[in-house]
Image (spheres, grey):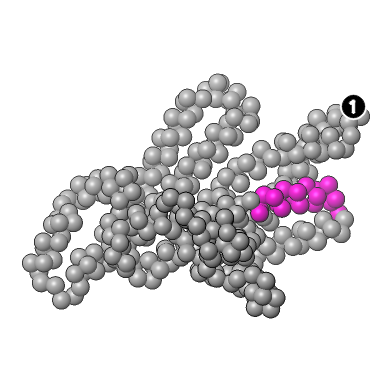
Amino acid sequence: MLVFILRRLLQALVVMLTVAFIAFMLFQYVGDPVTNLLGQDATEEQRTALRKDLGLDQPFPVQFARFVGNAAQGEFGLSLRQGRQVSALIVERFPATLELALAAGVIALVFGIPLGVYAALRRGRVGSQLLMMGSLLGVSLPTFLIGILLILVFSVRLKWLPSFGRGEVVSLGAWQTGLLTWDGLKHLVLPAFTLSVFQLTLILRLVRAEMLEVLRTDYIRFARARGLSNRSIYFGHALKNTLVPVITITGLQLGSLIAFSIITETVFQWPGMGLLFIQAVQFADIPVMAAYLCLISLIFVTINLVVDLLYFAVDPRLRVEGKAH
């Protein structure tokens, strides 16, 4: 177990150093921070002084080492667009993105797993076929189109739900949340459902495929021969083994929800990190882009590590293989 953890930690460190190098190259080859900060009318003396203050006159390895050290402390300098610390912007925007991703993940799990089980147990029936057709639409339709259609139906036509913004929020120390207000919850419904559609259909199809595979195994036939009820076979044996690969997919999808919430946040003007990143790209705000890249990579690496450890704990075959090595 210890060797497995150390190996995964080493892999995570290599990945983060690679991502840090890519983010550092943004500062080197995308725009000129000196020109962005001083403008076109600055004198050569001012440029030289600022370049020295920023450490841009140092050798490449020294600059990269300084960048990694600052990034490890969460420091990426000032936003070129807003003139504020990037770390402060991330702290301000991260709660909105995290709440949106968690809400979308809960929706995907709560609906995806039962619908996947239903589609497997009722294979060939009308309801199952309709679900599979709907899942194809969910996988195929782009997120921005789903969001626009939901806004058209529930905001413009029916006027049930708001179409943009986060609504009323309350402060819990440094954390601002809209989950404790009715207005905040209403603003969350449409973007959360929009973001969850792809993950919901993915989980549905995965659970259905795994459930059908498990139902063909020998131990399920043996359970039937023992006279166990269908309920006990389906939910006590088959579903438990079906959820093993779902753990991996669900964990990785949480990182995807956070990383790929950009389109949803843009459509609904949700004030999260995705919208901040889009605005940074439009303005070539390199510090914000680099911070977003490093943070999303850290989230993916952390979730992947946790999922690997859970998979190691759940699947006894991995523990046996680990002892063999």
Which residue is at the far bottom? 157
Which residue is at the far top? 323
Relative to 47, is 60 above or below? above
Q: Is residue 307 magenta?
A: no
State the residue at coordinates (56%, 50%).
254
The residue type indicated by label 1 comes to: Arg
Our reading of the magenta stretch's main secondary structure is: helix
Q: Nearer the viewer, residue 248 or 76?
A: 76
Find residue 39 and report its image quarter: bottom left
For the residue carrying disc 1, how many other residues have a C-alpha within 10 Å: few (<14), some (14-19), or many (20+)?
few
State the residue at coordinates (64%, 27%).
316
Left/right placement of residue 229 relative to residue 10 reads right
Q: Nearer the viewer, residue 141 or 147?
A: 147
Relative to 217, is 275 above or below? below
Find residue 309 and report its image quarter: top right
Which residue is at the far left? 45
State the residue at coordinates (85%, 50%).
122
x, y percentage for residue 258? 51, 55
Q: How many labels sit on residues? A: 1
- What span is colored magenta in the figure? 107-124
x, y percentage for residue 43? 10, 72
Left/right placement of residue 129 relative to residue 61 reads right
Q: Is residue 119 magenta?
A: yes
x, y percentage for residue 295? 41, 51
x, y percentage for residue 123? 84, 51
Residue that mark 1 sits on: 226
Find residue 323 and report its image quarter: top right
State the residue at coordinates (18%, 75%).
40
